[in-house]
Image (cartoon, rainbow, N blue to C red):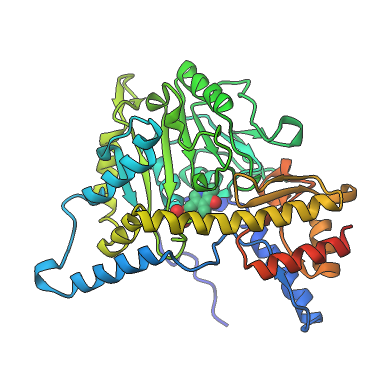
Amino acid sequence: MNEPAEHVNMASINDNYLKLTAGYLFPEISRRVKAFTAAQPEANLIRLGIGDVTEPLPQACIEAMTQAVSEMGVRETFRGYMDDSQGYDWLREKIAENDFRARGCDVSADEIFVSDGSKSDTANVLDILATGENRIAVTDPVYPVYVDTNVMAGNTGDADESGKYAGVTYLPVTAENDFTPALPSDPVDVIYLCSPNNPTGAALSREKLAKWVDYAREHRSLILFDAAYEAFITDASIPHSIYEIDGARDVAIEFRSFSKNAGFTGTRCAYTVIPRSLAGTAADGTEQPLHPLWARRHNTKFNGVSYIIQRGAEAAYSSDGQQQVRELVGFYLENARLLREGLQQIGIDVYGGVNAPYIWLKTPGGLSSWDFFDRLLEAGRLVGTPGSGFGAAGEGYFRLSAFNSRKNVEQAVERFQRVAG
Ligand SMILES: *Cc1c(COP(=O)(O)O)cnc(C)c1O
């Protein structure tokens, strides 16, 4: 037997990665599902745990990308590197016009940075912020990326048994506070907000979002606003962008993605807005605008999104494209309605699913999130996501996704009514 080498390599690693609690949630789900299907290979499982879209791309996007592929095959229309990795002007102009100016938001094309995803953008934004200096606030439950990337960057201490990291401010969101995080009692410098929310499906009202913008202005904090599910908003009073709130341009970065509206989860395109008026504080105490820092980061570490994909994203704003996106979103929202109403009929407390593709339910009979998971799996052959996997305050809750075929959703509702009714 070989002796283990004492030092294979002298390169020191980023020890912060060792603090990460083993990505517990999804591996544990697949472990339990595997064990169950090994014992019952005939079981016809329905998975309502997925955070991924199921329906094909809008036809308008397909046509635009097909056309773009042809252009790449001709010398005269071939494209190589972009002059500026921020994104083609024609796409950024369409974004500024349709997603912002049409809603009365003052956002210009040069404040938009096109990227390969909001997951990477919400992670990479830490590049332009100081390490270990900022007090970070997240909601509990939360999209795990916000927390894990702060751990990797060295902005936290170790995790405790409940999975909470030292040095992070957790703002619980439960039925008791209407899934609205309370303003922190101790000041924070960076706040992650996701509305409409993954996992709770709740959306922040104009009034509640305005409270956060006021808080950030008063405490000179930065809001990182993730609006990946903006297209699912059905309630006309809910803001689609944080820039609909007065004063937000001085305190907020907004993340948007084509993943959930146009089904680009496998195609990859998103964008981030950094207003020119947004600033932070340098170590010498001077105020420094964030836009040039992000532009520098983007151009140094990224060579832009493929021409073909940017043409596909642009097509989502054509009149056909918009119609097709509305149909896609409407399809998932109808799934959400069927799930929500099917569960309400059997007396389960259900939240979300109106302005978001997620249903967040209170487990019946006071079951723990994992006990409910096991019961659904064994008795209903249904797979969902235990709320406690998104944070300690998610204990006793459970997430169902509306990203599925209609047939699966209808069958799932029947099975639910059989086992949980
Ligand atoms: C799906 C999702 C995104 C989108 O991420 P992409 O990298 O653009 O696919 C962003 N934020 C949340 C909370 C999400 O659930």
Residue at position x 29%, y 52% in the image? 301
Task: Choose top left, top right, bottom left or bottom right for residue 274.
Answer: top left
Residue 194, located in which quarter of the rendered image? top right
Q: Is residue 411 left or right of residue 108?
A: right
Residue at 50% x, 47% y is 231
Q: Nearer the viewer, residue 286 or 346?
A: 346
Tell me where residue 124 appears, x and y as whole percent: 40, 46
Where does the C terminus fall, quadrant-wise? bottom right
Residue 19 as seen in the image, left or right of residue 161: left
Q: Is residue 333 above or below residue 73?
A: above
Quadrant (top left/top right/bottom left/bottom right) for the N terminus: bottom right
- Residue 352 in view here: yes
Q: Is residue 327 left or right of residue 179?
A: left
What residue do we see at 26% from left, 48% from top?
86
Q: Position of residue 355 (x, y in %)?
A: 60, 44
Locate residue 155, reporting x and y percent: 50, 38
Of 315 and 363, the residue lying toward us: 315
Outermost residue, top side: 218
* Position of residue 275 in the picture relative to residue 324 (left or right): left
Q: Position of residue 378 (x, y in %)?
A: 84, 69
Is any part of residue 133 visible from this angle?
A: no
Seen at 66% across and 48% down, the residue is: 353
Given residues 136 and 9, the one toward you in this image is 136
Compared with 294, 331 (above or below) is below
Q: Determine whether 237 is above or below 158 in the image.
A: above
Give the total of numbered labels.
Answer: 0
